[in-house]
Amino acid sequence: MENLTRQIKKAVRNRGGRARPIRTALICAAILFPFSYAAWGQTPPPPTPTPASSTPSGRSADPRYDEQSRKGATEAGPGTSQTSDQHFMKEAAEGGMAEVALGQLAADKASSPEVKEFAQRMVKDHSEANDQLKQIATQKGVTLPGSLSAKYETVRHKLSKLSGDAFDQAYMSDMLKDHKADIAAFQKESTSGKDPDVKQFASQTLPTLQDHLKQAETLSPKLSSATRNN
C-alpha cells in the first residue's frame, strides 16, 4: 500500500509542476478505494436497486423484488386460499346433491306417507342450502362438484332395486347415517372455519340438519315396528 502511494506521488512530480493537494487527494482516493475493501476481505456494497427499474419483459431488474412480488401474489384474500374451507364446501355440495337425488327417489318409491313427506322435505331444504352454497362458491372462485360421486351413485342404485317397506327402512337408515356425519362436519366448520361466509353458512344450516336427524330418529322406529307387526 505504501509503495503504491509513493508511485502515485512520483508520477505526479514527473508530470511537472505542483499538483494541487485536492487533486492529488482525489486521485489517491479513486485508486485506493477498491484496495481498502480488498485489504479487509470485503467487497464494495452493490448499488441499491429501485423497484421502478425493470427489464423489457416487465420483471424487476433485481431478482429480490421479483421474489417479493411472488410472495405477495400468493397471499390470498380472506377465505380464498383456506384448504379446509374449500374441502368443506365441496363435501357439503356433494352431500347436498345426494340428499336431493335420494329424496326425489324416495318421494316416488316410498310406501309410507311419512317417509314420502320426509323425502319431500329433504328435496326442499337441501335444494335451498345447495343454492346458497353455490352463490358463496361463485364469489370465492371455488368449483363445486356437478354430479354425484361413485359413492352416492352406488347408494342410489341400491335403493332403486328395493320397494315397499324394505325401501323405506333402507332409505331412512341412510338418512340417519348421512345426517350424523353432516352434523359433525357442519359443527366443525361453524366453530373452526376460517372463511367468515362459509362459517356463517355452516352455522345457519346446522339447525336444519339437526332437525332432519331428529325427525329421522323419530320415524325409523315406527317403520321397524310396522314391519314386525306385518
Image (cartoon, rainbow, N blue to C red):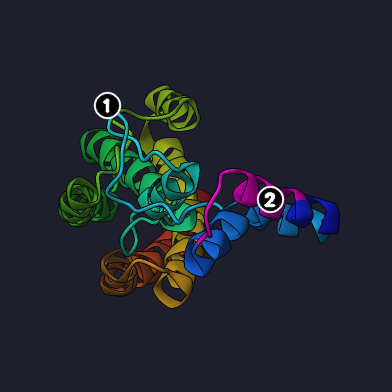
Residue 40 appears in the picture as rendered: yes
The label on residue 118 is none
Q: Which residue is mark 2?
A: 8
Is residue 6 rendered to the left or right of residue 199?
Answer: right
Q: Quadrant of the N terminus?
A: bottom right
Residue at (31% x, 47% y) in the render: 96
Whether 209 is drawn above or below 121: the answer is: below
Specify start and end residues of the magenta stretch as a single range.
7-19
> Which numbered disc, 2 or 1, marks the residue that appears first in the sequence?
2
Callout 2 amino acid: Ile
Percent position (x, y) of residue 200? 28, 72
Label pair 2/1, CB-CB below 8 angstroms: no
Callout 1 amino acid: Pro
Local packing at callout 1 (Cα closer than 10 Å; few below 14, some 14-19, many 20+) is few
Residue at (39% x, 38% y) in the render: 61
**Which residue occupies the foreground of this view, 40 or 132?**
40
Whether 32 is drawn above or below 174: the answer is: below
Q: Which residue is mark 1?
A: 56
Percent position (x, y) of residue 62? 45, 43
Under circle 2, the secondary element is helix
**Residue 106, quarter of picture:** top left
Percent position (x, y) of residue 38? 77, 52
Is residue 49 rendered to the left or right of residue 3?
Answer: left
Whether 105 is drawn above or below 198: the answer is: above
Percent position (x, y) of residue 33? 64, 57
**Residue 201, quarter of picture:** bottom left
Under circle 1, the secondary element is loop
Is residue 161 rendered to the left or right of residue 108?
Answer: right
Q: Is residue 148 magenta?
A: no
**Which residue occupies the foreground of this view, 34 or 177?**
34
